[in-house]
Image: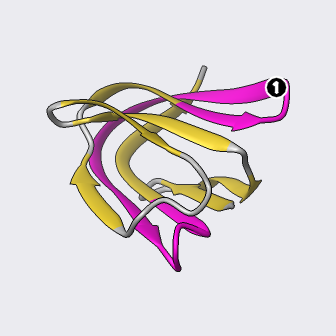
Amino acid sequence: MHVTVVSPERAVFDGAADAVVAPAYDGQVGVLPRHAPFLTLLGMGVLQVRQGSTSSRFQVSGGFLQVVGGGDAVRIVADRVEVS
């Protein structure tokens, strides 16, 4: 699936991934390929974008996560993003 992570300042991640684990407003949420369409508010915590045996980690705060295109695309728009 294609994952995009953006903040007001810049695009932080744009590429393929096998899984995403994000801090939703009311708890952790996991997204795998072909996930149902979904929209949630982000809380504060660690966002993980997994690509095979590696993962990219970001500290995020606020914003939203959206799954679109039959689970083929995940968009994360965060108020604040820091690479961890």
Q: Is residue 61 magenta?
A: yes
Instruction: Please say if 38 is above or below 5.
Output: below
Depth check, front residue: 6 or 41: 41
Within 10 Å of the Cα at label 1, are there few (<14), some (14-19), or many (20+) other Cα atoms? few
Say what amino acid the circle numbered 1 marks.
Thr
Q: Position of residue 35 (x, y in %)?
A: 48, 59
Residue located 42% across and 58% down the image: 8
Quadrant in the picture for residue 26: top left
Depth check, front residue: 25 or 81: 25
Horizontal side of 7 relative to 61 (left or right) equals right
Residue located 27% across and 43% down the image: 42
The residue positioned farthest toward the right in the image shown: 53
Horizontal side of 26 relative to 35 (left or right) equals left
Residue located 38% across and 41% down the image: 80
Q: Indicate the quadrant containing the N terminus: top left, top right, bottom left or bottom right.
A: bottom right
Q: State the count of labels.
A: 1
Horizontal side of 16 relative to 42 (left or right) equals right
Q: Position of residue 13 (x, y in %)?
A: 67, 51
Q: Is residue 58 magenta?
A: yes
The residue positioned farthest toward the left in the image shown: 26
Instruction: Please say if 23 is above or below 7.
Output: above
Depth check, front residue: 65 or 70: 70
Q: Indicate the quadrant containing the C terminus: top left, top right, bottom left or bottom right.
A: top right
Horizontal side of 53 relative to 38 (left or right) equals right
Quadrant in the picture for residue 25: top left
Residue located 55% across and 40% down the image: 20
Residue to which mark 1 is pinned: 54
Q: Which residues are magenta?
A: 48-75
Q: Secondary structure at mark 1?
A: strand
The residue positioned farthest toward the bottom in the image shown: 69
Main secondary structure type of the part rendered in magenta: strand
Q: Position of residue 76 (x, y in %)?
A: 45, 55
